Image (cartoon, rainbow, N blue to C red):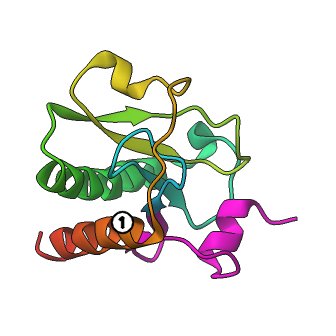
Amino acid sequence: MASIFSRIIAGEIPCYKVAENEHFFAFLDINPLAEGHTLVVPKHEIDYLFDLEDKMLGEMMIFAKQVAIAIKAAFPCAKVGVAVIGLEVNHAHIHLVPLNGVYDLDFKRDKLQLSKERFAEIASTLCDLILKQ
């Protein structure tokens, strides 16, 4: 059975897409720690990030870097944090989260409740910034 992320990539489940290329897909986390919290996933379904071939892992980080640059531009922050947990969905993924302090990347924190309109606005802003790179 396809992972929830594979179903999102296939368009079976709606998302707020931020960026896409031949191999990778980025979309907003629907339970964000901060505005701009984005997930980056390979289109090829693989469970564990470090099972990706070296070339693909490197390309995924370059793709994630483009998204992180847009997040930092849209949501002024000290840095964009990177988290790889991989236990909640059996599909490799990277969390990109705007950070101003170490506790901003605490997944035990309450998640933001954003409207569909706000999610769409954030996704559009990030898409535009990525296209301008």
Magenta part of the chain: 1-26
**Residue 7 left/right relative to 111:** right
**Residue lying at 35% horizontally and 40% vertically, measured from the top left:** 97
**Residue lying at 12% horizontally and 44% vertically, measured from the top left:** 76
Query: Label 1: which residue?
Result: 118
Is residue 31 something one can see in this rendering?
yes
Q: Residue furthest right?
A: 1
**Residue 66 left/right relative to 119:** left
**What is the quadrant of residue 83 in the picture?**
top left
The quadrant of the rendering that contains the C terminus is bottom left
The quadrant of the rendering that contains the N terminus is bottom right
Residue nearer the viewer, 110 or 14:
110
Q: Residue furthest top?
A: 102
Is residue 18 something one can see in this rendering?
no
Percent x, y for residue 66? 24, 58
Amino acid type, residue under disc 1 in the picture: Arg
Residue nearer the viewer, 54 or 121:
121
